[in-house]
C-alpha cells in the first residue's frame, strides 16, 4: 500500500522503516531533513511537504509530539489526501482532539502506542485503537508491521482514553516506587534487596522489573522523558474532566511530574520522579 507518513522522530522513524520492510511504499515528511534522509536510506521516499507525502496515499499516518502539531498538519492532510484514504494518528493526544479529527475526516483511527523507543525499534508496540471496525480491519497490516498487541477498544477517541489510563498507572507506579526507595534508604535498610523482595510479591510490576536497578543507580537517561509524561498528565486530567470523573491520585501524580519538570529534570527519564521524592524529604542532590 502507499503510505504517507508524517513525523519521523524517535518513534515514527523506526515505525516507518518497518512499514518499508513489510513491503509498503512509504513517503515520509518531517520538519527535520535529517530524519527524512534517514527514511530514504531505509528504502522509503522523501517528501518536502505534508501535501507531497499524502497525495496518492491509501493510508496517511501521523506520529507527532502533541495536539498542536497534529492540528497544524491536519488541514494539509484533509486538503491533499485522496478522499477515501484511511487516516491513522499514532500520536498521544487528547481524546477530545482525536474525536474532532474523526468528525472532520470520514475514515480516522486514533491509535496511540505503548512500548517506547525499544518497542518501536523491535516492532513490538502495543496499540490501542479507537474508530470504526471496518477501518480497524483495513489497518491490520500496518499494526502487524509495527506492533505485537493491538485492540480496537471503542469508537473515536477510545484509543486515547486507554493510553491516558496507561500513562496514569505508569506515572503513579513510578511515584510510589520512588517513595519506597526513599523510605528504605532513609531507614538504612538494603534497598536493593528490599526491591528484589517487592518484585517477587504482590507489589511486582513491569516498572520494578525493568527499572529498579537504574533507579537505585540514579541512572535517569531517557527512555521516556519527563517532558512527555508531563504532557500526558495534562491529557489525563483533561480526559477525566471530559468523562466527568475524579482522579485524585492522578492529580497528585501530575503535580509531582510537574515538580520534576520545574526542578529542571524535563529531559530526564520519568523514573527521575525519584529526585522529587528525595527533595521532599530533604535527601539527595538537588
Ligand atoms: P519526537 O519529538 O522524537 O518526534 C516527533 C517528530 O515530529 C519530530 O521528528 C519532529 O521534527 C516532527 N514534527 C513536529 N512537528 C512537525 C510538523 N508540523 N510537520 C512535520 N513533522 C513535525 O517524539 P516521539 O518520541 O517520536 O513521540 C511521538 C509521539 O509518540 C508523542 O505523542 C509521544 O507522546 C508518543 N510516544 C512516545 C514514546 C517514546 O518513548 N518516545 C512512547 C509512546 C508514545
Image (tube, rainbow, N blue to C red):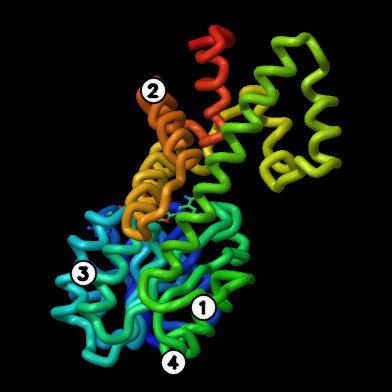
| Label 3 – label 4 distance at C-alpha | 22 Å
Q: Which residue lies under the disc numbered 3? A: 74
Among the 4 quarters of the image, the one containing residue 73: bottom left
Helix, strand or loop at mark 4: helix
Mark number displayed over residue 264: 2
Badge 2 element:
helix
How crowded pointer 1 is (Cα within 10 Å; few <14, some 14-19, many 20+) is rated as some
**Residue behind mark 4:** 134
- In the image, taking residue 213 as reference, residue 110 lies left or right, namely left
Kindly report which numbered mark, 3 or 1, lies closer to the viewer in this rendering.
1
Give residue 36's position: percent from left, percent from top.
33, 61
| Dot 3 or dot 4, earlier in sequence | 3
Q: With respect to residue 142, does 189 lie above or below?
A: above
Q: Which residue is mark 1?
A: 152
Secondary structure under the numbered disc 3 in the rendered image = helix
Q: Position of residue 64 (x, y in %)?
A: 33, 58
Q: Nearer the viewer, residue 86 or 57?
A: 86
Question: Which comes sooner in the sequence, label 2 or label 4?
Answer: 4
Q: CA distance from mark 3 to mark 1?
A: 23 Å
Residue at the image point whose x is 27% and y is 92% from the top: 84
* Numbered disc in front, either 2 or 4: 4
Mark 3 nearby-residue class (10 Å; few <14, some 14–19, many ≥20): some
Q: Would residue 17 be visible to someone looking at this image?
A: yes
Picture coordinates of residue 236 (x, y %)?
40, 50
Which circle's residue, 1 or 4, is located before the other in the chain?
A: 4
Residue at (65% x, 32% y) in the render: 177
Where residue 183 sits: x, y (%)? 69, 18
In the rendered image, the vertical position of residue 25 relative to residue 258, given as above or below: below
Residue 8 makes an appearance in the image: no
Q: Residue at x 82, y 17 (%)?
A: 190
Amino acid at each position: 500500500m502507499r503510505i504517507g507518513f508524517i513525523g519521523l522522530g524517535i518513534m515514527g522513524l523506526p515505525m516507518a522503516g518497518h512499514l518499508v520492510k513489510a513491503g509498503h511504499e512509504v513517503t515520509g515528511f518531517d520538519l527535520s531533513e535529517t530524519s527524512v534522509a534517514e527514511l530514504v536510506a531505509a528504502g522509503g521516499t522523501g517528501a518536502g511537504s505534508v501535501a507531497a507525502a499524502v497525495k496518492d496515499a491509501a493510508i496517511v499516518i501521523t506520529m507527532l509530539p502533541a495536539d498542536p502539531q497534529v492540528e497544524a498538519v491536519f488541514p494539509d492532510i484533509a486538503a491533499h489526501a485522496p478522499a477515501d484514504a484511511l487516516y491513522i494518528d499514532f500520536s498521544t493526544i487528547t481524546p477530545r482532539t482525536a474525536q474532532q479529527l474523526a468528525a472532520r475526516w470520514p475514515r480516522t483511527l486514533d491509535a496511540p502506542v505503548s512500548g517506547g523507543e525499544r518497542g518501536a525499534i523491535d516492532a513490538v508496540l502495543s496499540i490501542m485503537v479507537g474508530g470504526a471496525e471496518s477501518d480497524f480491519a483495513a489497518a491490520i497490516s500496518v499494526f502487524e508491521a509495527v506492533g505485537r498487541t493491538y485492540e480496537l477498544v471503542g469508537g473515536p477517541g477510545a484509543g486515547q482514553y486507554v493510553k491516558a489510563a496507561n500513562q496514569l498507572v505508569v506515572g503513579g507506579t513510578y511515584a510510589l516506587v520512588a517513595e519506597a526507595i526513599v523510605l528504605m534508604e532513609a531507614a538504612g535498610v538494603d534497598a536493593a534487596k528490599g526491591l528484589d523482595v517487592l518484585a517477587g510479591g504482590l507489589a511486582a510490576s513491569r516498572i520494578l522489573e525493568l527499572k529498579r536497578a537504574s533507579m537505585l543507580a540514579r541512572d535517569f537517561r531517557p527512555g521516556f522523558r519527563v517532558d512527555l509524561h508531563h504532557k500526558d498528565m495534562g491529557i489525563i486530567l483533561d480526559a477525566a474532566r471530559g468523562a466527568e470523573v475524579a482522579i485524585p491520585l492522578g492529580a497528585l501524580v501530575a503535580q509531582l511530574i510537574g515538580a520534576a519538570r520545574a526542578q529542571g529534570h524535563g529531559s530526564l527519564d520519568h523514573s527521575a520522579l525519584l529526585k522529587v521524592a528525595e527533595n521532599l524529604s530533604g535527601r539527595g542532590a538537588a
